[in-house]
Image (cartoon, rainbow, N blue to C red):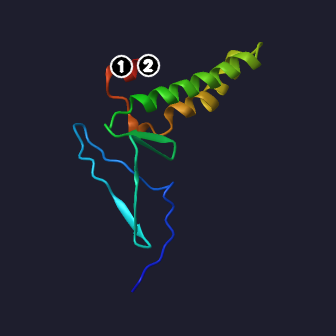
Amino acid sequence: MTITAECSRAECKIISFGRGDVAEYEYTITSQNLAIPFGRDKFISDLGITIYQELKFINHINEKINKANGVLGVIKRHFKYITPETLILLYKSMVRTHIEYGHSVWCPYSVTAIVS
């Protein structure tokens, strides 16, 4: 039985996870008697959560904080005269959602991540 499936090399990446030195083997796929190597990445992003090779989420946390600060800046620029109730509503619906998305996966456990 022969299985024929299309494989896009641009979409296929290899990442190895670990806290120390990770063995970096070269993986290839053979197509028409030609060995094509896969690319290797240091991080992967899936469903908006960026996972780095060292299993540290500090870069992901910084990305989410920057996104939330950007949205907060838009709120500050476009709403000059705003009641506190409206500000809280906008904050909870537009800013806090960026910070809380995927929190159970990357839950900040280090002091530096919690402070930021």
User: Which mark, by number, is residue 21?
Assistant: none
Furthest residue toward bottom = 1
Q: Left or right: 34 with respect to 101?
A: left
Amino acid at circle 2 = Ser
Residue matched to label 1: 112
Q: Is residue 58 above or below residue 37?
A: above
User: Which mark, by number, is residue 116?
Assistant: 2
Q: Left or right: 94 with respect to 60?
A: right
Q: Position of residue 112 (x, y in %)?
A: 36, 19
- The one nearer the camera, 87 or 47, is 47
Q: Position of residue 7 (x, y in %)?
A: 49, 65
The C terminus: image quadrant: top left
CB atoms of marks 1 and 2 within 8 Å:
yes
- The one nearer the camera, 12 or 107, is 12
How many discs mark residues in the rendered view? Answer: 2
Q: Residues within 10 Å of mark 1 (few under 14, many from 20)?
A: few
Q: Residues within 10 Å of mark 2 (few under 14, many from 20)?
A: few
Q: Quadrant of residue 60?
A: top left
Residue at image x 43%, y 29%? Answer: 59
